[in-house]
Image (spheres, rainbow, N blue to C red):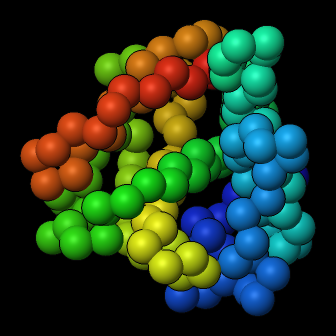
């Protein structure tokens, strides 16, 4: 059984190796942490001739928890997680962390727990709001 733990994703508990953002050919990736401490990164987009296109996120078996990590700026000064919300295709996501990324000056991170209700949804808009200000909408694809 594979579990992904948010504790491993928080900047204050990360290992010295987790401070690196891994990307393959500049394409965004998703990171998974196993119950045994193992980690894997999976693409959530690929470059297709002229633009990035989404790659389906597999939520895996019902026992798995899948986290989507977002990176941006202007997030760290929120007034707590109650001021941060995210939806994918209208379905609310649990925000596990929203603050400084910890490894790069000025870079902030948000960890979203993807709800199982998204399984089979396909492409949908991800809407992130921090302290009443909505970020640019992005598309994600859930298998």
User: In which quadrant is the C terminus drawn?
Assistant: top right
The residue lying furthest to the front in this view is 50
110 shown above or below 138: below
Apparent side of residue 94 relative to residue 120 in the rendered image (left or right): left
**Count of numbered labels shown in the rendering:** 0
Q: Position of residue 63 (x, y in %)?
A: 71, 44
| Point 50% across, 35% down: residue | 115
Is residue 23 in sight in this rendering? yes
Question: Is 109 on the left or on the right of 29, as rendered?
Answer: left
Residue 79, horizontal then vertical, whole percent: 15, 70
At x 33%, y 20%, the residue is: 90
Residue 128's quadrant in the figure? Answer: top left
Whether 121 is drawn above or below 94: the answer is above
The image shows residue 122 at horizontal and vertical percentages of 60, 10
Q: Quadrant of residue 46?
A: top right
Q: Is residue 77 left or right of residue 13?
A: left
Residue 143 visible in the shown view = no
Residue 57 drawn above or below residue 12: above
Give the residue at x 60% y 80%: 103
For this rendering, which residue is in front, 130 or 36?
130
Is residue 67 left or right of 139 when viewed as pictured?
right
Q: Position of residue 94 (x, y in %)?
A: 40, 48
Tell me what residue is drawn at x 70 percent, y 77 percent: 19
Quarter of the view holding residue 98: bottom left
């Amino acid at each position: 059984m594979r579990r992904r733990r948010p504790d491993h994703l928080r900047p204050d508990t990360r290992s010295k190796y987790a401070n690196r953002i891994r990307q393959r050919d500049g394409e965004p990736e998703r990171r998974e942490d196993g119950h045994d401490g193992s980690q894997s990164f999976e693409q959530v987009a690929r470059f297709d001739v002229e633009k990035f296109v989404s790659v389906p996120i597999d939520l895996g078996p019902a026992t798995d928890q899948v986290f989507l990590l977002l990176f941006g700026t202007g997030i760290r000064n929120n007034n707590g997680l109650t001021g941060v919300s995210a939806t994918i295709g209208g379905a609310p996501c649990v925000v596990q962390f929203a603050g400084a990324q910890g490894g790069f000056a000025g870079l902030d991170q948000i960890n979203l727990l993807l709800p199982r209700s998204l399984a089979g949804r396909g492409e949908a808009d991800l809407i992130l709001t921090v302290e009443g200000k909505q970020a640019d909408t992005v598309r994600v694809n859930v298998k």
